[in-house]
Image (spheres, rainbow, N blue to C red):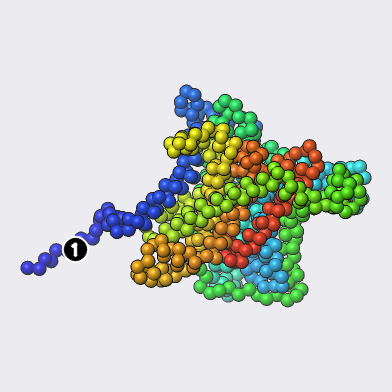
């Protein structure tokens, strides 16, 4: 007799057991990757936070109470929040008009002007601050220009940087970060279905009303994606306050604590970093809950491609004007760095060209005496040349690590449907939501564990050894901080590539590793090159980790050497050499960003999203 009993659907638990049993290699790979990310990212941060709760007598909230009881630190914390909000607002106010013009209109020089928008990304804001000191100093370029125009007396000097304070900081950081907002907004606007705007116009909607009712809400995911990165970056910015000697921010207070470590001061610094981290995460999650949920379906892909309206010659000039103006302002710090790098000093009577025996940039709008001695110095001075080699080593090794991890993570996220891959995605993007300042102190907190692990394999290390020769710390730090670039670029390549060829190779008997190396990697090679270029170049110019973890000159990377030279007043050639080193770094990033932009196009903005 044939059974007529109904077939019961598998329970969720039995389905999961079957899924893991049949797909166990994929689950094993995911677990290994999650374990690596937990060990390299989450554990150091948790260790640092736990150290803030411990003193010689056990668990305590004393360090937090001490930090919050410090009226000066509370004021700096509030000022840092205000600075981050102002910078985020200014970045979006600058980027939105440019993104709207680039999205809606086609005009002469659009490609070139769009590339100029990205120029500020080629120099960390704190390097630009060194050049700005010469432009906005007491008798800098601006003061001398106003004297020539008769607006100031010949002996009247104005220290614009000191007078501006907060707003100078906000302006410099804004000019360095607004391209992140521009890239994200441009990508979001390109994904808005133009049929919606046409329907609104047919119903009588005016342009301004349509912008606030349709364009702005639909671009909100991109707006939030860029704003979250900008806010966290500005809130934790360390290099610019150090370069300008601006002390009224929390990051500078924490750095000063590190420089004066005695006894339990490490725990106090950890407590302050933990407060900064909690505030950053609270603001990020609040914004995510408020704005990030507005990811309407049509923002993922437009049903009809938008057509940019071609402008006449006169209208093209109007469309180009905002790009030219903002790009000029954004490039002022870079121009200051380039000019200072070419400035001859009085102790070089036979060097360069211009009036002999004078300092090339003293009470003049631009230098009147030039030399290439700064560039020869960076290759002939062992300490400076050593910093370049150090950065190359740190960045090359960290990029190699990121390539392996990035491809593996992207493959699990895009090519599998394993349960729990969302956690892997969140962990891989975590460095974009956690600042370098926090991560650097996290690595300091786990130095004892690193020494213990080294001892287990027969390598004797003391904690001071890792700070005096921080190769391991900096490689891990750079790998962690720049991993999202490789993950995003690899994932973008896999999303654009059909899985058919990989399945065909597997059906013909190729092993998963052979399929990956012979089929998958060649198909996404352009994305991998773009991600690797960004990873390598931004690792070369990593600021917070380099400033905090590199303690001795022989281990300095480029950014720490620039900071050291830029603040060394023992000779005027030191600042000039710092600027020459900064120009070298600019050249590296210009090449990599242009190459990455060529390979990835408008998808480049996806790399800079939390």
Q: Compared to 364, does 71 lie above or below?
A: above
Q: Compared to 341, does 3 lie above or below?
A: below
User: In percent of the image, x 69 and y 37: which residue is there?
Assistant: 247
User: In percent of the image, x 42 and y 58: which residue is there?
Assistant: 412
Say left or right for 559 vs 8. Answer: right
Q: Position of residue 249 (x, y in %)?
A: 65, 39
Question: Which residue is nearer to you in this view: 450 or 320?
Answer: 450
Q: Position of residue 580 (x, y in %)?
A: 74, 50
Q: Secondary structure at mark 1?
A: loop
Q: Position of residue 480 (x, y in %)?
A: 52, 48
Q: Most extreme residue toward the top, as rendered?
A: 57
Q: Residues within 10 Å of mark 1 (few under 14, many from 20)?
A: few
User: In percent of the image, x 75 and y 75: which residue is there?
Assistant: 313
Q: Position of residue 260 (x, y in %)?
A: 63, 30
Q: Compared to 315, does 288 lie above or below?
A: above
User: In percent of the image, x 50 and y 26: which residue is there?
Assistant: 55
Q: Most extreme residue toward the left, as rendered?
A: 1
**Residue 211 visible in rendering:** no
Say left or right for 43 vs 532. Answer: left
Question: Which residue is nearer to you in this view: 227 or 55?
Answer: 55
Question: What residue is disc 1 on?
Answer: 7
Total tally of numbered discs in the picture:
1
Quadrant holding the N terminus:
bottom left
Question: Which residue is nearer to you in this view: 131 or 465?
Answer: 465
**Residue 32 visible in rendering:** yes
């Amino acid at each position: 007799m044939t059974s007529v009993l109904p077939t019961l659907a598998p329970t969720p638990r039995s389905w999961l057991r079957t899924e893991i049993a049949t797909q166990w290699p994929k689950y094993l790979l995911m677990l290994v990757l999650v374990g690596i990310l937990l060990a390299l990212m989450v554990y150091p941060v948790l260790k640092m936070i736990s150290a803030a709760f411990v003193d010689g007598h056990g668990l305590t909230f004393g360090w937090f109470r001490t930090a919050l009881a410090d009226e000066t630190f509370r004021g700096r914390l509030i000022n840092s929040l205000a600075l981050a909000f102002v910078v985020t607002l200014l970045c979006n106010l600058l980027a939105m008009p440019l993104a709207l013009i680039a999205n809606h209109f086609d005009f002469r020089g659009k490609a070139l002007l769009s590339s100029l928008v990205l120029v500020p990304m080629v120099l960390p804001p704190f390097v630009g601050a060194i050049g700005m000191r010469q432009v906005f100093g007491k008798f800098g370029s601006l003061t001398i220009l106003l004297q020539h125009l008769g607006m100031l007396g010949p002996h009247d000097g104005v220290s614009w940087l000191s007078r501006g304070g907060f707003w100078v900081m906000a302006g410099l950081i804004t000019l360095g970060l607004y391209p992140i907002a521009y890239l994200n907004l441009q990508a979001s606007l390109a994904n808005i279905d133009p049929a919606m705007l046409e329907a609104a116009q047919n119903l009588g909607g005016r342009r301004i009303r349509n912008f606030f009712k349709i364009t702005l809400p639909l671009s909100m995911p991109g707006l939030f994606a860029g704003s979250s990165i900008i806010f966290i970056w500005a809130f934790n910015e360390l290099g610019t306050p150090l370069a300008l000697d601006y002390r009224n921010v929390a990051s500078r207070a924490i750095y000063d604590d590190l420089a004066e470590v005695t006894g339990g001061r490490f725990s106090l610094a950890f407590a302050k970093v933990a407060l900064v981290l909690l505030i950053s995460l609270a603001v990020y999650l609040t914004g995510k809950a408020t704005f990030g949920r507005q990811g309407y379906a049509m923002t993922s892909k437009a049903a009809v491609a938008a057509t940019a309206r071609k402008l006449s010659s006169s209208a093209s000039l109007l469309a180009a004007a905002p790009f030219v103006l903002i790009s000029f302002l954004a490039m002022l710090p870079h121009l200051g760095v380039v000019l200072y790098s070419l400035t001859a000093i009085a102790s070089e009577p036979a060097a360069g060209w211009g009036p002999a025996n004078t300092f090339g940039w003293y009470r003049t709008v631009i230098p009147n005496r030039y030399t290439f001695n700064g560039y020869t110095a960076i290759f002939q001075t062992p300490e400076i040349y050593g910093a370049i080699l150090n950065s190359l080593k740190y960045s090359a090794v960290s990029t190699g690590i990121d390539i392996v991890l990035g491809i593996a993570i992207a493959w699990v996220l895009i090519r599998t449907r394993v349960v729990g891959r969302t956690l892997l995605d969140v962990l891989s993007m975590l460095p974009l939501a956690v600042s370098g300042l926090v991560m650097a102190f996290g690595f300091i907190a786990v130095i004892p564990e690193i020494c213990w692990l080294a001892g287990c394999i027969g390598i004797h290390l003391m904690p001071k050894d890792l700070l005096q020769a921080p190769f391991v710390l900096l490689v891990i730090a750079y790998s962690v901080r720049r991993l999202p670039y490789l993950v995003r670029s690899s994932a973008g390549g896999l999303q654009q590539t059909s899985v058919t060829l990989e399945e065909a190779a597997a059906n013909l008997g190729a092993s998963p590793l052979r399929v990956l190396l012979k089929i998958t990697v060649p198909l996404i090679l352009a994305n991998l090159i773009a991600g690797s270029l960004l990873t390598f170049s931004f690792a070369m110019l990593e600021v917070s980790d380099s400033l905090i973890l590199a303690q001795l000159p022989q281990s300095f990377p480029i950014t720490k050497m620039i900071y050291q030279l830029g603040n060394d007043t023992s000779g005027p050639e030191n600042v000039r050499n710092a600027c020459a080193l900064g120009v070298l770094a600019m050249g590296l990033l210009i090449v990599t960003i242009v190459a990455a932009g060529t390979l990835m196009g408008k998808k480049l903005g996806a790399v800079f999203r939390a």
